Image: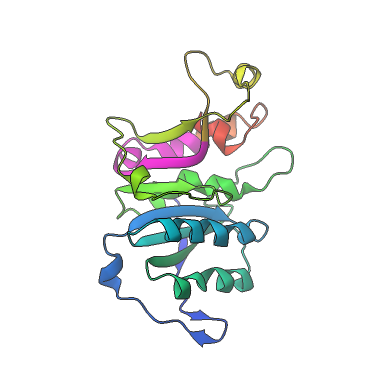
Amino acid sequence: GPICMVVIYSIVSGNNMPMKHENNFKNSLPVFLSADDFHAPFVGPCVCSICENTNENITFYVMERLMGNRNKRKIMNLCNKYENCEIKFISVTDEDLNHAQTRCGLSTSAFPRLLIPDLCPEIDRAIYLDVDIIATGDIKKLWDQDLGDHVVGFAFGHHGIDFTHIKAREGISDPHEYFNSGVMLVNCVKWRNMGLTKKLFDVEYKTRDIRVHNDQSVLN
């Protein structure tokens, strides 16, 4: 499986960041984000909106693709602002992503979401959010959703978009309803038991000529 580097920064902009007691975050909500230098400015508002609206301690796992240290330091500064915030960076390489390819010159920074259950095998359940999302309520309400026997909880489609032509291009038949991968609640145990990471990257490789929405198409 993929082997990635987890880096926890403790020095921010020349100031010693107060170390938070590890036990305080032992049962924190794991929220995964994915970004490169281009998407780094969106991470701050996303993290702030979640911390402002959530009482629980939150560990943010930022899956980064070639993000510079300057942007990492800026993001880590948020730990000084919020007592319920812990941030960890996970460096993801092309090899980890099986050299995934995107259409229309888009960044591959979204593909790390396919690795989440394998990146942190100690985590049984996780939330993934696109970094351009602003939380207007307590994210614990999402965390508490019952997945039943399902592996992942998604939001259906995008408002006002007809996915009929996309499903036809990608060979997706009814009654499947196209879903949006920007918000995911993941049962990591079931995902790992089903070996979904390898299966999804197999789909990524086989559908490179027909995909419309890259990682979202792979998941659908």
Inspect this view and state whether residue 92 appears.
no
Q: Give 113 or 54, whichever is nearer the viewer.
A: 54
Residue under the image location 27 percent in, 31 percent down: 148
Image quadrant where residue 105 sits: top right
Dividing the picture into quarters, in which one does residue 204 lie? top right
Residue at the spot 60% in from the left edge and 29% down from the top edge: 207
- Give, as a single range, the part of the protein colored magenta: 181-201
**Residue 82 visible, this orientation:** yes
Residue at the top extreme?
A: 174
Is 141 magenta? The answer is no
Residue 119 percent location from the top left of the image = 41, 54
Q: Is residue 121 above or below residue 195?
A: below
Q: Residue 42, percent across and down?
A: 61, 57
Where's residue 4, x and y in %?
Answer: 47, 59
Q: 25 or 120: which is nearer to us?
A: 25
Q: Which residue is most to the right?
A: 104
Give above or below for 159 relative to 14. above
Horizontal side, residue 30 vs residue 219: left or right: left
Q: Which colour style is shown?
A: rainbow
Q: Is residue 161 above or below residue 51?
A: above
Decide if residue 70 is on the left or right side of residue 144. Answer: right
The residue depicted at 48 percent of the width and 49 percent of the height is 136
